Amino acid sequence: MRRVPRIALAGAAAASFALVLSACGGTSTSSGSSESKGDKGLAIAYDVGGRGDQSFNDAAYEGLKKAKGEFGYETADIEPTDGETDADKEQRLVSLAKQGHNPVIGIGYAYAPAVKAAAEKYPDTTFGIVDDSTIEADNVADLVFSEQEASYLAGVAAAKATKTNTVGFVGGVDIPLIHKFGAGFAQGVKDTKPGVKVLSQYLTQTAEEGGFSSPDKGKTAAEGQIEKKADVVYAAAGLSGQGVIEAAAANKVWAIGVDSDQYKQEALGKYKDAILTSATKDVAKAVYNLAKSVEDGKPETGIVRGDLKSGEVGLADSNPKFKSDTAIQEAVQAAKEKIIGGEIKVKSS
Amino acid sequence: MKKFDKERLLLAVAGPVIALVVAVALTSVVLIASGKNPFEPYSIMFEQATFSDIQVLIINQASLYYIAALAVAIGFRMNLFNIGVDGQYQLAAMMAAVVGAHASLPAVLQVPLLLLTAVLTGAFWSGIAGVLKVTRGVSEVVATIMLNAIATSVIAYFWLPNVFGVKVGNNNTTGEMHESGWIPGFDMGDAGEIYGLVVLAALLGIGYWVVLNRTRFGFDLRASGASETAAAASGVNPKRMVLTAMLISGGLAGLAGLPILLGDSHTYSLNFPTGIGFLGIGIALLGRNNPTGIAFAALLWAWLDKASPELDFHGYDKEIAVIMQGLIVIAVVVSYEAVREWGLRRQQRRVGAELAAGHVLGATSDNSTQKEVAGR
């Protein structure tokens, strides 16, 4: 007798499974669904960290704001969830495309498989993907950057600014994208002053462990490097970079910011005097440019690379102390010209 | 007898139902406090569940949750807390992906090979914690959570280009697996594809029930969980039981990532879902370590996950679903304890009443002992 309710329960479960399977109505994205609202503008789907990371995702949002202001259309920006699958990302992009958003941009290489699949379903919508160059489709623009070039310049500045002949690099997560920052930085330092030691540390192995989103981890790592006599620390670590900058300010050494011009950021106002410069990566401009190209009726497609030449990566000079230091400025300028001229090839790993 | 069965069912269902009601009520309070409509999000999410493509997403996700939760549950049944399911399934999925990319056998051999790789990897990883526990008395909670951290480092090592890694753009992958190891899904037309290994998840659920309730091993395991000393006195070797349970738990955990690996992604990349092992703990709790209960819990969790993104398009935050999941776990723990005590009191009252009426209660008291063991 004891068995009966269990078997009944199992039966109920099986029945409900079957029900779910057979109850298939229309799909949420079928064209007959009630929600097609016609033409809308740019939509972006954020990477891990989301809005408020004072860095990568916020830069994308800046681009969105600019496009919204200029073209006066409705925009959307959507955050990811933790531990999601490619299917979830695809669902997000497809939902945005279904609602009439154009272009739809995935921020971060993690969106690559999702962008590819969504672009096949909505051939008339332009899709963009930041930091990935693997997708080849007529309606996809691959927005990539030569981060190593800006990092090289940061390395030049660091080598010129260090007095202890030791500089530090803090990478958010141990992945190929961040290796580009580290490699460019180290090369810039070595080419400028061969005797300078470069300390290098990655905060975590995966993004899920918080390498891009944990200022406390950044702070600990930077303090460790400062203890080993580093007097310039370069952070390529998203939100974690705040901790690096905080540690640098507390110990009166230089920090170099990343992605956005961090000297100008309100959230970092307290520490801005410690921010020597920032290796910028103008995601905002790339996002805006794609939106503009769609608005102009000539959507970008294929690989769109931002480098020193196009000005989409570079070194910020809003800190007056940095700008007025002629020795650093001359060295940076010379290196920049050599990179643009092809005289210096910057390694990306 | 019939009446008693109803009682059991009532007690089993009351816990989760109370927890859900409390969680929904509290979530509505949060919504009201933030000045939003406390009911509309639910109707949006229910509407999502009627779309076939969302249903496919829910079932696919639930299959991952279900296997992970079974792995956690088998540990719970004998008072072992395998918090390392997360590391075990990730490492196992990676090893399966590596083997799948380098071995190329016919499908009849390739698929079993991949399944076996995953099971053995998961069992090996949890086995380390098991061995440490039986030989050195190290708490399995501490050992498995440390092994999670080590697993991520091992995975990062395997991703190096000179080990097993293949770079695709800025992503780390293990290279595409040979097609003989892919498991075709059930084609649902426009709605997408249901992973083929959803069937495996269901079979594992049945196997779990049979082993626990219909074998001597299952009885020993439940007995060890209920009272280790009593089990030892009746001839169960507790050390062997601990090690076996950890190995089975890890082996099951190893399979948790395979539905998506063999059914969709075909490579282990940075995009592979993480954290399923931790979600499995909550799902096993909600499902009361019962295979049917866990199935409902896994579907509920997957529904909250897959239906909530739509909220973003209606002016609500999809994090509402995360708040709800958290509240459910807390409410479940509280309500189960409350329901258990309430059930005990009811039983005592009834026994008291029947004793007063002069009845003899052989069968019922037998059953209640059984229930104590099974209901853990």
Image: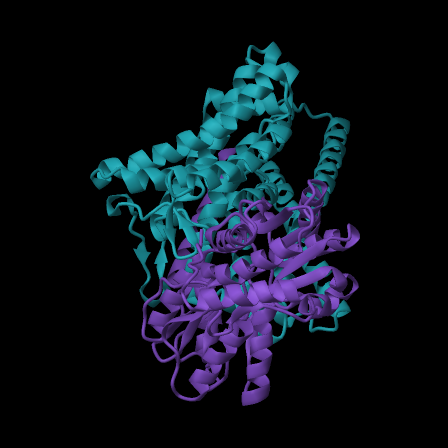
Chain colours: A purple, B cyan
Q: In the current view of this chain or complex, which residue is farthest to the left?
A: B106
Left or right, B271 with reference to B371: left
The image quadrant that residue B227 belongs to is top right
The image quadrant that residue A61 belongs to is bottom right
Q: Which residue is pictured at 63% across the width and 62% down the height?
A: B319
In the rendering, at what x and y percent does residue A273 appear?
Answer: 76, 63
Q: Does residue A54 show up?
A: no
Q: Which residue is pictured at 45% across the width and 51% down the height?
A: A349
Task: Identify which residue, B243 or A7, lies in the foreground.
Answer: B243
In the rendering, at what x and y percent does residue B266 appear?
Answer: 34, 49
Is A245 above or below relative to B175?
below
Q: How many marks?
A: 0
Task: Identify which residue, B317 or B354, lies in the foreground.
Answer: B317
Task: Identify which residue, A150 or A92, lies in the foreground.
Answer: A150
Q: Which residue is pictured at 46% across the width and 50% down the height?
A: B270
In the rendering, at what x and y percent does residue A60 appear?
Answer: 56, 71
In the rendering, at what x and y percent does residue A38 appear?
Answer: 46, 86
